Image (cartoon, rainbow, N blue to C red):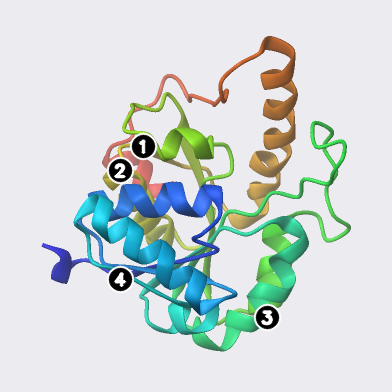
Amino acid sequence: MAQDRPVIAVVGGTGKLGAGLARRLAKAGYVLVIGSREAGRAQSAASALARDTGGQVTGQANRAAAAAADIVIVTVPFASQRAILEDIGPAVQGKIVVDTTVPLVPPKVARVQLPPEGSAAEIARATLGEGVRLVAAFHNVAAHKLIQEIEIDCDVLVFGDQVAAREAVIELAAAMELRGVHAGPLANAVAAEALTSVLVGINKRYQADGAGIRITGIDPGPAAREA
C-alpha cells in the first residue's frame, strides 16, 4: 500500500533520468513529488505522469518537493548539482538523499574527468552536511531504458556510509525492477561515476543501446545487507 511506503521526491524530475525513475516508481505505487526549478513545469510533468500511470503524483519547485518527501532523489546535470543541493539543503536534513550525479564534462564525455573534490558524491556530502543520510546510486542505468516497459540488464551500485540507508535505496531499485547491489561507503562512488564515462565510450565504439554493468557470482540476499 502506498501509505506504508515513503513519499519520494525526484528533484530534476523533468529531465531524462528523473523522468525514467519517476515513471517506474509511480508504476510501483509510490507517492511521488516531481521537482523542477520551475513549479509550473514540475506540475505539468506530474499531471502527465499521473495520467499515464494512474499514480499519485504532484509537482512543485525543487525545495518544496524535497520538503514534502521522505526520500529525495537528485537527478540533475553536474553543472547544476551544487546550486540545486544548496537550494534544497535546508529541506532535506535528517532525510535519505540519493545523489545520481555524474561529472560528465562536455564535449569529451567519454573521458573520465573527476572534479578536484574527488567525486560528485563528495561534493554532495560537503554541500549538504552531515545531517543528511547521503546515498549515491543509479549512475550507470540508461535513462531511455528506464522510461520503457522493458527488462533492463543492468545492476545498480549503491554507495553510502549507512547500511540502512543503502538498503532503503536497494528496495526502491527492486520496486523499479532493477537489482541494487551494496557497493560500500560513499567514497567508493567515484568508481561508478568514472565508469559512466567508460560506458559512454563503449556505447559509441560498439553502437550499443545503453550498455550497463552486471555483477556476477553474488547472492543479493541477507548476507549482502551486512556488507
Residue 145, image x and y in percent?
Answer: 45, 33
Mark 3 or 1 closer to N-term? 3
Q: Which mark is residue 7?
A: 4
**Gap in angstroms between the C-alphas marked 2 and 3:** 30 Å
State yes or no: discs 4 and 3 in contact (Cβ < 8 Å).
no
With respect to residue 82, does 25 lie above or below?
above
Give the class, few, some or many, for how many residues have Cα within 10 Å of label 4's Cα (few <14, many ≥20): some
State yes or no: discs 1 and 2 in contact (Cβ < 8 Å).
yes
In-image side of 77 versus 178 (left or right): right
Q: Amino acid at mark 2?
A: Ala
**Gap in angstroms between the C-alphas marked 2 and 4:** 16 Å
**Gap in angstroms between the C-alphas marked 4 and 3:** 21 Å
Element type at mark 3: helix
In-image side of 131 versus 223 (left or right): right
Q: Which residue has dot 3 on it?
A: 86
Q: Amino acid at mark 4?
A: Val
With respect to residue 98, does 210 lie above or below?
above
Q: Which residue has dot 2 on it?
A: 174
Q: Amino acid at mark 1?
A: Leu
